[in-house]
Amino acid sequence: MSDKSFTFSHAISRKPSRSSVDGLRAVNVGAPDLARFEQHHADYVAALRSTGAEVTVLDAMEEFPDSVFVEDAALCLQEGAVIMRPGAPTRLGEAREMAPHLETLYSEVVCIEGPGFIEGGDILTTEREILIGLSARTDKAGVDEFIRLVDRWRYAVRVVDTPPDVLHFKTDCSLLDGETILATKRLDRSGCFKGYNVIHTADGEEACANSIRFNNLVIMPAGFPRTRDQLLAAGYEIREIGNSEAAKLDGGMSCLSLRFSPS
């Protein structure tokens, strides 16, 4: 079994901007505290770098309040990168800004041109397939164009439904290893993870489903002790990172980086 779905040589992240207080959110629970957000982000980058990966931290983009969430702008595979077309109109420029950074690292970068929409937060890449959740930000037209683009690299793609009132597919799940997925019970009930080992988030701790496996670490948001203890008992090495400010903008661990090993 390969481990290319969680073993990475590179990551790209972007500093939070002062304008993040104007970022999109499903429910307004208050503006993020920028100083605290910057510290959490620095801790996150340090965790990525601690695994030996090369991490590029891009400058904040004040014109795009949600640009700290770089994952939605692109999908990075081993063979090439796909520039997304975000479903929120205010975020379209973020994808265009990401393209030149990836073009310095990949020999092939392709773009979703539209009219459909697709965001990286709805895409979970495992060892056997790419899972895409349809959502308010990712529609069938966007997925169809994505499938045509990645056919050159011979990836199997499976389309599933994101639960109602959940922003992104990966809000409710994350990859732990080649065969294991961390997921909320509500998402697992849909049957989309049949054939995988699934560890459920503890009741009341669904918000930590958005974690990441990055080389030897599972990086998860702090404050979810029962799920953390489950993962420790399963043998994973855990690094907890503060996420209170990103969470005010519906952001989590996967949202804050692009993770890849360009061939």
Image (tube, grey):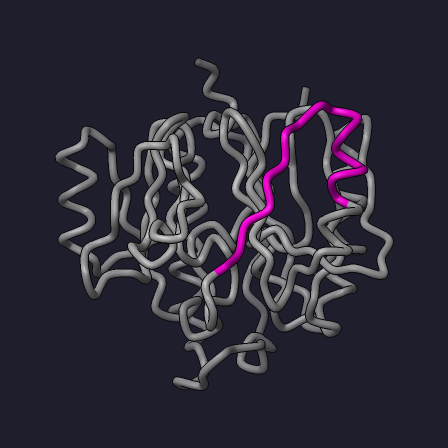
Residue 45 placement (x, y as % from top left): 45, 46
Task: Reply above or below: 16 against 22.
Answer: above
Q: Nearer the viewer, residue 220 or 161?
A: 161
Q: Is 42 on the left-hand or right-hand side of 136?
A: left
Q: Is 260 on the left-hand or right-hand side of 50?
A: right
Residue at 75%, 73% (x, y): give it.
89
Q: How many marks?
A: 0
Task: Reply above or below: 62 against 189.
Answer: below
Kindly tell me whether residue 67 is visible in this rendering: yes
Location of residue 51 (image quadrant): top left
Stretch in magenta: 146-162
Residue at 77%, 56% (x, y): give it.
141
Residue 234 placement (x, y as % from top left): 18, 32
Q: Is residue 161 magenta?
A: yes
Quarter containing the N terminus: top left
Residue at 15%, 54% (x, y): give it.
225
Q: Is residue 110 magenta?
A: no
Task: Reply above or below: 225 against 25.
Answer: above
Kindly tell me whether residue 43 is visible in this rendering: no
